[in-house]
Amino acid sequence: MHIEIVQAVEFLGRLLNQKVEQESINTFKEKLVELLKHRFQDHWDPQQPYKGNGYRAISNFNGQLDPILTLASIEVSIQPSSIHTHLPREFVLWIDPFSVSYRVGDHGNIMTLFEDRSHGRISFETPSPVLFQPRISTPIRISPPNSPPDKEKSRNNKGLVLAN
């Protein structure tokens, strides 16, 4: 749980970097880690990693800053409006066992920040630190297939004469 929370909080810190004073960001991140650990304590099941993921989501949605972000900012003397202003609109961050991902926009792509790919594998080797590096996702655009050719044009191309 600790690795996933740290990955998520570091990502939020990068979003706020150069927009909020660095010392304030650091204390905000420390407080947020503490609050998230407490909040997730009874809502973290590695056997069912997506069970309860709505409870572990952090959002800036419908003009409302997530209550846990508001609480963390108030406890470290940062105006919640300062956090709210500098986070993307319609933003959701999911913190699940073995995975941290986010989406910007109601219909945006879900991007993976962190994924522990060793989950579910049996290994007798010491885990490599690479397993805990953030995975960088690249969004892809899926285009609809081309329209079928116009029947009239295809008949004309075959040497057929169309009568009116």
Image (cartoon, rainbow, N blue to C red):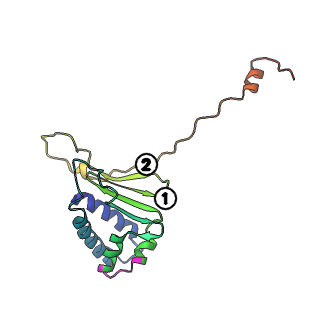
Crowding at dot 2, Cα within 10 Å, few <14 / some 14-19 / many 20+, comes out as: few
Q: Judge whether residue 76 is colored magenta.
A: yes
Kind of residue at disc 1: Gly
Residue 40 in picture, x, y percent from top left: 24, 62
Image: magenta residue range: 75-80
The answer to whether 125 appears left or right of 25 in the picture is left
Q: To which residue does mark 2 refer?
A: 138
- Residues at marks 1 and 2 touching, judged by CB atoms closer than 8 Å: no
Q: Main secondary structure of the magenta part?
A: loop
Residue 105 is marked as 1
> In the picture, which quadrant includes the C terminus?
top right
Question: Element type at marker 2?
Answer: loop
Q: Judge whether residue 60 is colored magenta.
A: no
Residue 159 in picture, x, y percent from top left: 78, 17
Question: Element type at marker 1?
Answer: loop
Vertical arrangement, residue 163 with respect to residue 117, above or below: above
Kind of residue at disc 2: Thr
**Which numbered mark, 1 or 2, is in the foreground of this view?**
1
